[in-house]
Amino acid sequence: MKKEKCFYLGKIVKKYSFKGEILAKLDTDQPQLYENIETLFLDINNRLIPYFVMASRLHKSNLLRLKLEDVNTESGKYKDKKRL
């Protein structure tokens, strides 16, 4: 997938739980539109990496709580606040 065919949705702001969940701050006025997102690409080292979303729900105002497939721990993988 090329970045030109994608749009910037937001960025990961922190880990949420010890089960591998993350919080993403969405850059949108309508975060509820993305509450049922199924797939997303993370910009990791200037490469788009696809992830399947197992669960998502709004958290507070414009944060989206995400559980990604095959991410089951609170390891530092997302420590550097990757872009969505």
Image (tube, grey):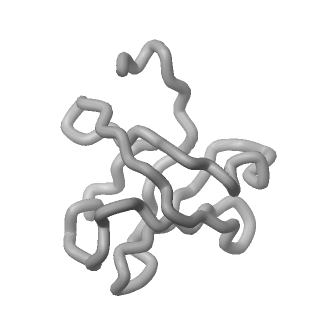
Residue 51: percent from left, percent from top: 38, 47
Residue ID at (57%, 56%): 25
Residue 40: percent from left, percent from top: 47, 42
Residue ID at (45%, 78%): 16
Q: Is residue 53 above or below residue 16?
A: above
**Residue lying furthest top:** 4
- Quadrant location of the N terminus? top left
Q: In this view, does 26 lie above or below 70?
A: above
Residue ID at (56%, 48%): 38
Q: How many marks?
A: 0
Q: Is residue 63 above or below residue 31?
A: below
Residue 10: percent from left, percent from top: 53, 45
Q: Left or right? Give the position of 56 relative to 70.
A: right
Q: In this view, does 62 lie above or below 84?
A: below
> Which is more toward the observer, 30 or 34?
34
Residue ID at (68%, 49%): 34
Residue 67: percent from left, percent from top: 46, 67
Q: Left or right? Give the position of 63 relative to 28.
A: left
Q: Left or right? Give the position of 28 relative to 80.
A: right
